[in-house]
Amino acid sequence: MSGGPPAAASPAFGQADLSNCEREQIHLAASIQPHGALLLLREPELTVVQASANAAALLGGPVLGQPLGTLGGDAAARLAPLLAQPLDAIPAAIRCTAGRTAEPFDALVHRPAGGGVVLELERPGAAPDLSGRVERALAAILAAYSPRMLCEETARIFRDLAGYDRVMVYRFDEDGHGEVVAEQRRPDLEPYLGNRYPASDIPQIARRLYVRNRIRVLVDIGYVPVPLEPRLSPLSGADLDMSLCALRSISPLHVQYLKNMGVAATLVASLMVGGRLWGLVSCHHYAPRVVPFPVRAACELLAEAVGMRLAALESFVQAQAELSVRRLEQRMIEAIGRDGDWRGALFDPPQTLLHPLSATGAALLIEGQVLGAGEVPGTAELRDIAAWLDAQPRGLVARSALGQEEPRFAPLTPGIAGLLAVPVSEQAGEWLVWFRPEQVQTVIWGGDPFKPVIVGDDPTQLSPRRSFAQWHQVVEGTAERWTPTDLATARLIGETVTDVVLQFRAVRMLIALDQMEQVRRQVGASDQPAVVADAAGRVLLANAAFARLLPEGAAPARLEELLPHLAGREEAALRLQEVLRNGRSWRGEVALRRPGGDLPLLLRADPVFSAPDRVLGFVFLFTDLSDRKAAEAARRRFQEGIIEGQRLRAGPLESKSDLIFRTLLQAVVENAQLAALEITEGVEVSRIPAMLEEVRASAARAAQVLEGLIRHAAEESAPAGRREPG
């Protein structure tokens, strides 16, 4: 018997209502928009096994069961060279002729999940020379120095390029709600800038399709869908997966949604940042609008470039935050040597701790003491907060509506509504906490988010929201949300303070032997490998994290006994002798010999003084550099891959198109290189290889789209009789 209720069935395309639209199989539309035709071809003979019902009329005769080469034109010859490619992620574009009269068509080719080759045909429209406009647009994208400026430029670029009545840049927040952050429109249209729309307006299945198919067009809201014949693919026995189809029909629910807005045609481009759907460029027109393939391809290319630039700008903010944290760390270390304590440097001046997180107050709870700056709760309330934090899962804790989530803290509002906390040791009650005040705000929604559905003419039926009049919601009891950059900065400050706490307590261990057992537990509980030695090099304490680095039973009694475990032991021995002899700090890289390969480590050696020129001992901290080394290797591979990809595409100049392609490709490469440089600043090094791969893939995708666009333009400008297949 089943252990739970059966899973809810996913409604077929066109059978969903607002109670189950999240699961509507919109990629299995089994129909297309009528401005083109679709053929499903069986390989290798390229026989038509499924077609849109209008294909016969468009091509001048029956198509089902016919090899593509017998239908007229050069489509089969043009398609043949592409079949060696996977064609399962990005459709390939070609200009071909087809049908009994060999009419010209713009064609998109891809392989769907169920097998075969999908060929989509559209009659070509007049397209302007885009090379100069795309080059200027790429330059403007690269010149944008803030996300806001970039979004405004993006809206302007897309309206100029595609000519829609309204262009909006739409950003998703952490809860999936969307906000219009930039807009270009006809002067007579009502502005949507600043409007928010609930997450339910774009179901998750639609968002997943936006990740796969990054440019979508609706030509005429009043279209009559053209069915596929037969309904099921003969190759799979199931509905054709139309995820990558440009002609795919639009969900009837979404069509009704657009009709309720008065929109007649749309173009939507995805903005991808770090592998996630950051937002959309949404273009609305209030009359039917056909967009030629070259314009669509240019829009897709520019959306990829915008995504790369957004990633770079967001990482720059994080890099600036990391720089301020490093300065804070340096001040704390200097304070230990100067004053014998680090806590004063953490709060002097207070803005150095508050500003990076846009906080109005901060408090440190450590060793029974409470230190604060700015607007913070009283000592009793802070101890209560620390006890509550101890009960949470260990690690960073962030709340934007503390009083609402934990009613006992509600009296702290309005002064305190947001909380961000990081532990600074393994001991209970030791936390660094930032606070933000209540921020009463009026959120402008494009329609009432609490009434996303209405009863239609038939009381038993639900339909999309019909009213998009601005609806104002007053939000109280909440603070400004902590951003991902805030969380990363807090985590970095917490790690820095934790390291300083560990070092400081190690110092006190050497100074006060009666505290040895207490500090031994704290150093021992640290996840960072650490060794404490006296002035003669005798190991007083090596914690469990350090022991795990060495072979079993290899615990050293003296520092010299570490040398056989290090690669380049002569250099390591020289550095160790200098530390012991001169009593000076040293930081450098060492490599620990291990059966699976050397482990790169950063060694941080600091002397402990009881008086000037008198060394009591040393604290050695080891940091695993594997992720950093992997990141450096990833950077090298990225640069080599970018250069090699550019070299492979930069053949001899044979035409004006080659020159245009090389110029635009250089702009794409420069954008990618700048994005790669800025995106990896200030992030966790373990994330860098994946982030660089995202930039590389995005650049490759942009180059592929650009190559198809230029090839298409060259084919379009060449006399029909002189075009060569492929």
Image (cartoon, grey):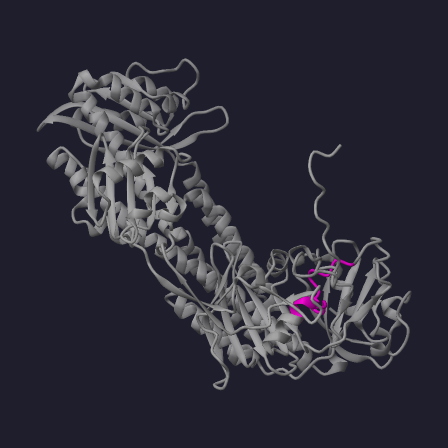
* Up/down of 85 relative to 588, above or below: below
The front one of 704 and 261 is 261
Quarter of image, res 433: top left
* Up/down of 716 relative to 702, above or below: below
* Up/down of 47 relative to 518, above or below: below
Residue at horizontal 70%, vertical 55%? 86
Tell me if I can see residue 116 in this picture: yes
Please give left or right for residue 434 compared with residue 666 in the image.
Answer: left
Q: Position of residue 382 (x, y in %)?
A: 26, 39
Look at the image and tell me in which quarter the C terminus lies.
bottom right
The front one of 69 and 470 is 470
Q: Residue furthest left?
A: 612
Look at the image and tell me in which quarter the N terminus lies.
top right
Tell me if I can see residue 652 in this picture: no
Q: Residue furthest bottom?
A: 188
Please give left or right for residue 338 compared with residue 127 in the image.
Answer: left
Residue at horizontal 43%, vertical 45%? 632
Q: Which residues are magenta?
A: 240-255
* Up/down of 275 relative to 587, above or below: below
Q: Position of residue 171 (x, y in %)?
A: 48, 63
Residue at horizontal 40%, vertical 58%? 314
The front one of 637 and 461 is 461
Quarter of image, res 426: top left
